[in-house]
Image (cartoon, helix red, strand yellow):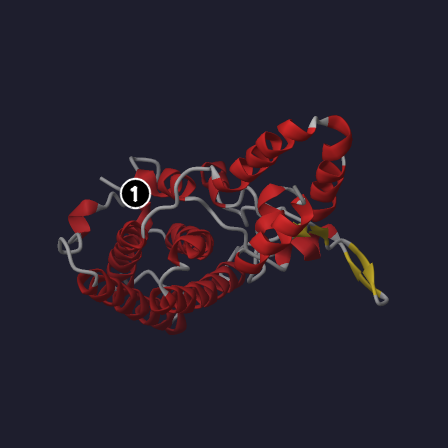
Amino acid sequence: MNIFNILKEVEKVDPEIFDRLDPRRAVFKHFGGFGKKLAAAAVPIAFGSMLNKAYGQTAMPSVRDVLEFALKLENLEYFFYRRAADTNIFANAAGKTAFTVIRDHEEDHVNFLRTAISGMGGAAPTTYTDANFDWTAKGTLGNATFTNYPTMLAVAQAFEDTGVRAYKGAAPALMSNDGVLQAALQIHSVEARHAAHLRRMRRDMANGVATNKPWITMKDRGGLPAAFQGIYDGEEVTTQAGVNIVGTFGGIAIDANAASEAFDEPLTVAQVNSIVAPFIK
């Protein structure tokens, strides 16, 4: 049983096979010891166990499930921005314009997702209204969401940062549908631009968060309350595809902060559900 040849064949259809198992170096170390540690008859069983680690995880949600989940999140954002854009608590006209533009983008995302779900046949997509959402976050924010400008911006940042990581987390489940995957990644980039702009708005407001960058550093909350920490946990990753990207490369030094800022890390459906649960009735 030539394990290395088998892995090379698997890698042709799944380039991420080694990352699913372990960092590449560790995988070869594990397999290198197979022949020495196991009887020949036991190798297939051990190899199957390793593959089970890669592919025997929780079943991937269906494309329909992912789109329905995205539809709920996009409706949450759309109804939030619809209410926010109608307020008169903005520090300047540019802020109100930004919220109006973002509201329109979110409405476009909602319409796209409804069309995509309808195109798949089966039951109609779920319909949401403003009444489906709790803008007090189960009482945590009281009535401040649309009456206090810093709070409104903080909620907007929280939604956008979550959305960016949620779309990245959903991408593997959409790989079977090129059209939907492409559209989802386009929405992901729009959400990222929203997040960057809102983080800049929070930095620039009176008594704003001076350290807030357009991107996330490590798992820093950017001045948001501790209750929002779940949005940022896991962003402190400094390795990508098993490669440590902290160090000096070609004379360019990359520290841990810069390494964490370079990539958005995915969130699972369960993590996103936990984050947005206070806003869902």
Q: Say few, some or many: other residues with alpha carbon within 10 Å of mark 1 (under 14 / 14 to 19 / 20 or more).
A: some
Q: Nearer the viewer, residue 26 or 196?
A: 26
Q: Is residue 218 visible?
A: no
Residue corresponding to mark 1: 279
**Local secondary structure at mark 1:** helix
Quadrant of the image for the N terminus? top right
State the image quarter where residue 255 is shown: bottom right
Q: Nearer the viewer, residue 170 or 11?
A: 11
Q: Position of residue 64 (x, y in %)?
A: 27, 53
Q: Position of residue 164 (x, y in %)?
A: 45, 57
Q: Position of residue 89 (x, y in %)?
A: 33, 60
Residue at x 34%, y 65% (from the top left corner): 180
Q: Position of residue 54 (x, y in %)?
A: 54, 41
Q: Nearer the viewer, residue 134 or 64?
A: 64
Q: Nearer the viewer, residue 70 or 207?
A: 70
Residue at x 69%, y 57% (from the top left corner): 258
Q: Which amino acid, by three-letter code, is at mark 1?
A: Phe
Can you say whether 131 is above or below 106 in the image? above
Q: Is residue 194 left or right of residue 45?
A: left
Number of dots carrying numbers: 1
State the image quarter where residue 84 is shown: bottom left
Residue at x 52%, y 45% (from the top left corner): 232
Quadrant of the image for the C terminus? top left
Residue at x 58%, y 60% (from the top left corner): 213
Q: Is residue 57 left or right of residue 280?
A: right
Can you say whether 92 is above or below 164 in the image? below
Residue placed furthest toward the right: 251
Q: Is residue 127 visible?
A: yes
Q: Is residue 143 left or right of residue 153?
A: left
